[in-house]
Image (cartoon, rainbow, N blue to C red):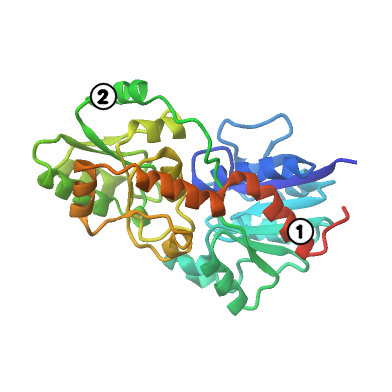
Amino acid sequence: MTRAAVVVSFRLGGGDGVSVEARKWRTALTTLGFAVRAVAGDLGGDAGPDDVVVPGLGITDADPVDPAALRRTLDGADLVVVENLCSLPLNVAAARTTAAVLADHPGRVVLRHHDLPWQRRHLQALDREFPPRLADALHTTINLRSRRELIARGYAPVVTIQNHFDLDAPLGDRDTTRRRLGFRDDELVLFQPTRAIERKNVPGAIRYVASLARAMPDRAVRYWLTGPAEDGYETTLDRLVERSPVPVTIAPAPAVADGYAAADVVLLPSTWEGFGNPTIESVWARRPLVVNSYPVLSEITTCGVRFFDLDDVAALVRFLATPDPTLFDVNLRRARSSFSIADLPAAIDAAFASMGWTAW
C-alpha cells in the first residue's frame, strides 16, 4: 500500500529557500515510496492536483486558520513534514493552530527547522513556545548549530540533514538571459540570488561591488540582485539603489540555472543563513563565490570547498586576471562527497530508521 505524506508550510512552490528545499524533500519522499501532497497558505502557482491552499496559513494572512480545515488536509497522512512553519513563527496564529492540530495527529510528524525563533531578534520572545514539543516527533535541522541549540533546550530526538543539490544539472542560457536583462557582453555581472531583507546585507554587497569597480577601472561592473524586497525592506532598498555608485539591476532570473549562467561572480554577503544555498549552487555552476563569514559557513567549508572573502577584494581581482579552473574542479569534487542530491533519500530514510519508523 502506498504511504501518504503531507508537506506543510506557510508557502511552498516559490523561489525562497524553504520552498526550494521542500521540493527536494518531496522528490526524495516520492523515491522512498510516499505519495506526497503539499499544504500551504500560498503554493506559488506551482500547485499539483492534490495540493491544498489553506486560508490563514500564509505569512501575511490576517484571518485565522480553521483548525478543522487544516485537520482535514492531514487526514490519512502517515507522515507530516512541517517546513519551518512551527520553527520560525512568522505568522504566530497559524503556527499555534498548526501545532495544536499536529498534537492530535495520529501519524508521524517531522518538524524540519530551517530557522529558529531565538535566531531572530524580533521572535526571541517566542522561544519557549516554538518549536512545539510534540510527543514522538522527529526534529531535523539543516545545520549542526541549530541541532546543538535544540538539544541544549531539551529537544529530542534531533538529527541534522543538510541541504542537498543536483550537481549534474545543466546550466541555463547565458546569452539570452543577459540580453533580456540588458547586460552588455563586456560587463562583469556580480549576482546575488537572494531576497532583499536586512540579513542579506545588500549594503555590504554594494560596497564590495563598488570596491571591485575601483580596483578594475578598465572593466564595467554591475550588481544584480534577484530580490524581491520583503519584511518592510522596500524603502531601504530604494535608498540603497539610489545612492549606489555602481549600476544595480533588481530582477528575478528566468530560472535558477539561467541566473548562474548569466553571472560572472556570485555574491552571498549575508550576516545569517540557515544554510546558504548559493554556496553549493555556485560550485555546481562553476562560478567564483564571494561570501561573508556567517555563523554556519564553516559547516559547509569543512568538506574542503573554497570561496572568496567579502573583506578581500584583491583576491578576486587576482583570480579574474588569471582564472584557475582547478578551483572549480576541486570544489565540485569535494561538494559531491557531502551535498549530492542522490544521497538525500538515504539520509531521510536513515533518520526515520533512527526513530524506529521502519513499518508504516
Q: CA distance from mark 2 to mark 1?
A: 48 Å
Q: Position of residue 185 (x, y in %)?
A: 23, 25
Q: Is residue 102 above or below residue 323?
A: below
Q: Position of residue 204 (x, y in %)?
A: 25, 54
Tag 1: residue type?
A: Phe
Q: Mark 1 Cα within 10 Å, few/some/many (few <14, many 20+)?
A: some
Image position of 185 (left or right of 307): left
Residue 194, visible in the rendered structure: no
Q: Is residue 338 above or below residue 47?
A: below
209, 249: nearer the viewer: 209
Q: Secondary structure at mark 2?
A: loop
Is there CB contact under 8 Å for labels 2 and 1?
A: no
228, 297: nearer the viewer: 297
- How many labels were placed on the picture? 2
Tag 2: residue type?
A: Gly
Q: What residue lies at 22% left-to-right and 53% top-to-bottom? A: 315
Residue 114, visible in the rendered structure: yes
Q: Mark 2 Cα within 10 Å, few/some/many (few <14, many 20+)?
A: few
> Which quarter of the rendered picture does the N terminus lie within?
top right
Q: Which residue is mark 1?
A: 352
Q: Is residue 102 above or below residue 173?
A: below
Image position of 158 (left or right of 171): right
Q: Position of residue 40 (x, y in %)?
A: 63, 43
Q: Position of residue 89 (x, y in %)?
A: 56, 59
Query: For residue 201, which quarter of the picture?
Result: bottom left
Q: Secondary structure at mark 1?
A: helix
Residue 94, disc: none
Mark 2 vs mark 1: in front: 1
Q: Which residue is mark 2?
A: 182
Q: What residue lies at 40% left-to-right and 60% top-to-bottom? A: 272
**Mark 2 or 1 closer to N-term?**
2
Q: What residue lies at 82% left-to-right and 50% top-to-bottom? A: 78
